[in-house]
């Protein structure tokens, strides 16, 4: 894991894990603006050759760190990030149910996005 760099590609809606120039994992997300600003992870993907190296967990941890630095919340729809947050409540504050509903509504309104 020490050679992995994590890069936020906000314009592309990707938090990427790079091993050199190769993207070996990513969280696909969007930014919800209303009713509150939130990062909404939808999918976590790690390339098969890189599974089991802690990349997905590092991506989830960095997503929550970004949200903390920006003073916004994470409203996880990605099953992996939901489970990671349950295991790391000290790093992943709980989110209000209405914000999760708003995130799901946004996703339903943008079916081709993910």
Image (spheres, rainbow, N blue to C red):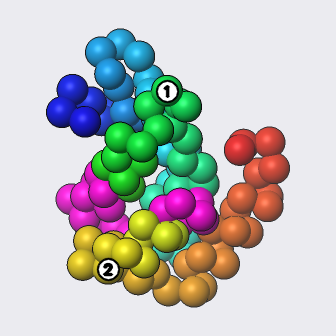
The C terminus lies in quadrant:
top right
Residue closest to the eye, 6 or 96: 6
Vertical placement of residue 27 versus 102, above or below = above
For the point 30% across and 15% down, the residue is 20
Vertical placement of residue 103 versus 39, above or below = below
Q: Are marks 1 and 2 in contact (CB under 8 Å)?
A: no
Q: Left or right: where does residue 4 sit relative to residue 12?
A: left
Residue 58, given in percent of the width and then of the height, sits at 31, 49
Vertical placement of residue 80 versus 90, above or below = above
The dot on residue 49 is: 1
Crowding near pointer 2: few (<14 within 10 Å), some, many (20+)?
few
Residue 42 visible in image: yes
For the point 18% across and 33% down, the residue is 2
For the point 59% across and 85% down, the residue is 98
Magenta segment, which residues? 61-81
**For residue 74, what is the image quadrant?**
bottom left
Q: Nearer the viewer, mark 1 or mark 2?
A: 1
Crowding near pointer 1: few (<14 within 10 Å), some, many (20+)?
few
């Amino acid at each position: 894991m020490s050679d992995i760099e994590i890069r936020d590609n906000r314009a592309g809606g990707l938090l990427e894990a790079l091993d050199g120039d190769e993207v070996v994992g990513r969280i696909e997300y969007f930014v919800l603006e209303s009713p509150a600003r939130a990062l909404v992870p939808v999918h976590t993907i790690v390339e098969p050759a890189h599974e089991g190296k802690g990349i997905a967990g590092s991506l989830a941890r960095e997503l929550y760190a970004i949200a903390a630095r920006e003073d916004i919340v994470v409203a996880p729809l990605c099953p992996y990030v939901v489970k990671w947050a349950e295991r790391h409540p000290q790093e992943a504050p709980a989110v209000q149910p209405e914000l999760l509903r708003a995130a799901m509504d946004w996703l339903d309104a943008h079916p081709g996005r993910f």
